[in-house]
Image (cartoon, helix red, strand yellow):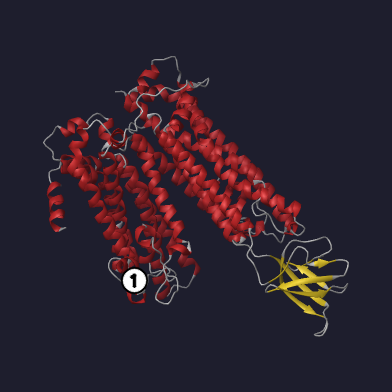
Amino acid sequence: MFALAHYFWRLLPANPILLRVILAGGKRRRDLMIRMGYLGLLITVVLFSLLASIGTTNQDLSQLAKTSASLFQTMSILQLALVALLAPIFTAGAITQEKDSQTYDILLSTPLSNGQIVLGSLFSRLFFIVALLVSGIPIFSITQIFGGVANRSILFSFAIAAATALVTGALAIAIATFKVGTRRTIFGFYLFVVVYLVGLYGLDRMDAFHPVDLYGVPLQTSWLTGLHPFLALQVVFGDPHYLPPQSTSLPPALRSWPIGWYLSSPHTFFIAFMSTLSVILVLPSVLLLRRMAQSTLSPKSWILEKFHLSRGDRKRKPRPVWSNPIAWREARTKASATRSSFLRYAFISAGLIGAAALLYLYASTRPVNRHLDRNAYDPAMHELTIIDNDTPSTYRIDNKTIITLNSRPYSLEAGHTELQVVSFTLVNPRSRTLSTLQLAPLPRRLSAEQARSFLLGATMIEFAAILLIVTNAAASTVTREKEDGTLELLLTTPITSRYYLWGKLRGLVSFILPLAATPVLSVGMFVLYDLGRFVFSSHGSTDPWFILPEALLILPAILIVVSAFAAMVGMHMSLRCRKTVVAVMASVGIMLGLCGALGWCGLMLTSGMRGANPVQLLFAGFSPFTVLSLLMAPDRFGGRLFDPADPSAMFAARVQLLAFSLVACGVYCLAIWQLYKNMVKNFDMTIRRQSR
């Protein structure tokens, strides 16, 4: 390993690729502004955290240490999130950008070795990420003033972030070298990183992924902790609810190396494993770079040819083109590719199947020891049969018997479904006549609170993925045509800038509509279930709505309008920027900052509402994620304004939320129209300026 590291180190000095990016990166205004924004965000978090802690408690030394530890955790999570966001953007086009700009063949004809080209491309991409990490060291040092944070914790935090960026860059190099990546797969790679982080974090919450210790007790950490940067970072924090086990407390079969190391110290395993994986991913690229460049077949084509699976030229029926061919091209050609179609259908299928499984767990009940079946009550004999541990017992019901369901008066005369018997009392010990009977619905396999949390999280992830997809697609829609020279051909046709830009927007929105239907249909499943429960259940009408039914009106409008706004932002940056990577990075940064700021402000406004304040709901309506939270969990995120104990106030709040959400959609539409007019006005001048 030392010899291999020494070989890599010898390839770095006097590397023109690395030196070019390092020297140019320090002079570019864009990189300087990003560093300033990153440091400004960290400083803002530090200042607000310190001011909030000083204003709420009496600050003794122990409290200052707790504040410092909390501040370190917040900054570490923020730093790792920014690295996970920026690293794929900077590294995804490592070698493909050279191919797109027609300089790749020239680069291969130079005396540079394979190792210098590969490592120069890798570390030049990672240089900006490393510069961000190094620039944040002085701010992290502030946490050392009050104590509560060990030096090794800061070291591990930076090491986890660096290992995450390194393995991301190595994977991008491998994809680009073996011709399985082009500029169209940049977003696929970026989406894979997001799905990996979100998916493994969700699986970690399931008990099936948690091994048991020597005494049969499930561990707090899981089998996935050592493979996920945020879970490994949680171990570094010393979270009492997420502590790794001691090696001596593991079963003998799990103590051997490397399993014992993996379970007892997942954060160090993550750093070592990701660093080793990076070397493994880079080595084939170093050895086979020029051989793969001389090959005319991609790995996929080579496999199809070897197994005689290639069918050669195939004919297909002509497809009708829309009245606007630009819109048809954006909507259909993006979705017609095999990879794009697979991703679309996989996204839709996963969302709907997950929602259906969640609804099944929520609707199904668990068996209980003492309950009533459907035919338990005999109105002619006034007798009730209670099944206790599969043993039926019959009791009499008279006019003095007090029967309650969920602490509310209830009558068995109108019929009932299966109910749980919470408790009952007799008139006297020798009598078989019931004095009181407390009933409750059978417990569900998944409680309403758990199901609502899972559905809200899934819907937010789907919405975020939709915004990410449309932003990336829009950010590359004009720069792609600039890079391959097709924009100049389009400009020689009678197509006007208004026609061109409106076609792009219409095509992008049409492309995203099937994806936007996934969260709407998922929410619709639960609304229809509630509607059926209220209509056909004799006791269901007393239960609150699982999801507010007006979500079927608000959710589609918000998804479509905000997605169109994200498309306009991406198109605006794609028109202004020359390179796809720069346009994608700027567009994603703008949407991330906008959604994050609106979500934080909306949460602060709604969580503190004491009464029906229309102004707070008005501002909350502009935050799409806040509106989703209020629609699906109003009692959790709406404060006293959505208190079920006050039906009149809650009804007024629901009406205001519906009205202000539609108002916010109107404002977003005005912003879209203004951006569109501005792009049409400056289109020709921008294109001419960039053609110099």
Left or right position of 488 against 624: left
Q: What element carries label 1?
A: helix
Question: Residue 387 location, x and y as percent?
Answer: 72, 72
Residue at the (75%, 72%) spot, across then down: 386
Asked which quadrant contains residue 94, the reply is top left
Is residue 30 positioned above or below 502 on the image?
Answer: below
Report the front residue among 90 and 370: 370
Report the front residue among 65 and 448: 448
Residue at the (36%, 35%) spot, across then down: 184
Report the front residue among 345 and 621: 345
Left or right position of 360 against 45: right
Report the front residue among 232 and 690: 232
Residue at the (44%, 40%) spot, across then down: 343
Question: Residue 146 location, x and y as percent?
Answer: 35, 70
Which residue type does callout 1 highlight? Ala
* Residue behind mark 1: 253
Is residue 613 positioned above or below 493 on the image?
Answer: below
Determine if residue 448 is in view. yes
Task: Tell me if mark 1 has few (under 14), some (14-19) or many (20+) residues whose alpha carbon lies within 10 angstroms of its own.
Answer: few
Number of marks present in the image shown: 1
Question: Residue 273 location, x and y as percent?
Answer: 28, 58
If the image is split into quadrants, where does the C terminus sit?
A: top left
Q: In the current view of this chain or complex, which residue is farthest to the front?
A: 308
If the image is split into quadrants, where does the N terminus sit?
A: bottom left
Determine if residue 138 is in view. no
Question: Residue 484 location, x and y as percent?
Answer: 32, 26
Is residue 2 positioned above or below 309 on the image?
Answer: below
Left or right position of 151 against 338: left
